[in-house]
């Protein structure tokens, strides 16, 4: 069993930055791809970013590419999402997730098995 706990959310003005953290416990996630997703009010959950097990490959939604950066520290069982130049449309609950299969990653929700409870990010205009 894997438990994922997100932190680092909060209220920030447009143009500001936040760094989200995802702490994994229970089992190591070092050989699994990890992803960040978000869900805004009255919208479906959507892909934000993903990172391969080694950290060598990263993937981003078009809406965040160039502003967000995903990274990981396998020794600490942590995954991060650095969010810069935040916009009001980035307001959402952000979730981290672990891929179902070792050594796999991607942008589709069905590729992920374990999910955190989420952390709220609110960007004011």
Image (tube, helix red, strand yellow):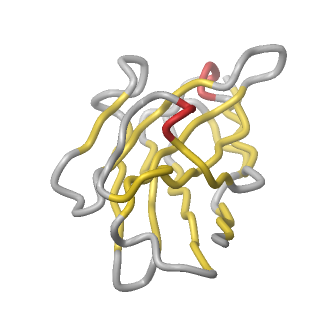
**Quarter of the figure that contains the N terminus:** bottom right
Residue pictured at 55% horizontal, 57% vertical: 20
Viewer-nearest residue: 92 or 51: 51
> Quadrant of the rendered structure where residue 85 is?
top left
Q: Against 84, is 61 above or below?
A: above
Judge from the rendering whether residue 79 lies leftward or rightward of residue 123; answer left or right.
left
> Quadrant of the rendered structure where residue 116 is?
bottom right
Residue 4 percent coordinates (x, y) = 65, 65
Viewer-nearest residue: 15 or 10: 10
Residue 84 percent coordinates (x, y) = 42, 41
Judge from the rendering whether residue 62 lies leftward or rightward of residue 97; answer left or right.
left
Judge from the rendering whether residue 62 lies leftward or rightward of residue 38; answer left or right.
left
Residue 53 percent coordinates (x, y) = 29, 60
Q: Against 51, is 27 above or below?
A: below
Task: Pick out the residue farthest to the front.
Answer: 101
Residue pictured at 38% horizontal, 60% vertical: 32
Residue pictured at 51% horizontal, 33% vertical: 86
Q: Against 43, is 117 above or below?
A: below
Q: Count the labels in the image.
A: 0
Residue 48 percent coordinates (x, y) = 48, 32
**Quarter of the figure that contains the C terminus:** top right
Task: Pick out the residue farthest to the left.
Answer: 56
């Amino acid at each position: 069993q894997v438990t994922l706990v997100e932190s680092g959310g909060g209220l920030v003005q447009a143009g500001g930055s936040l760094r989200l953290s995802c702490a994994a416990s229970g089992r190591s996630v070092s050989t699994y791809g990890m992803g960040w997703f978000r869900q805004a009010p009255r919208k479906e959950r959507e892909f934000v970013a993903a990172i391969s097990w080694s950290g060598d490959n990263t993937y981003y939604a078009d809406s965040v590419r160039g502003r967000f950066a995903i990274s990981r520290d396998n020794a600490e069982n942590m995954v991060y999402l650095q969010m810069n130049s935040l916009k009001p449309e980035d307001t959402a609950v952000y979730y981290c997730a672990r891929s179902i299969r070792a050594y796999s990653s991607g942008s589709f929700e069905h590729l992920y098995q374990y999910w955190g409870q989420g952390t709220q990010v609110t960007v004011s205009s």
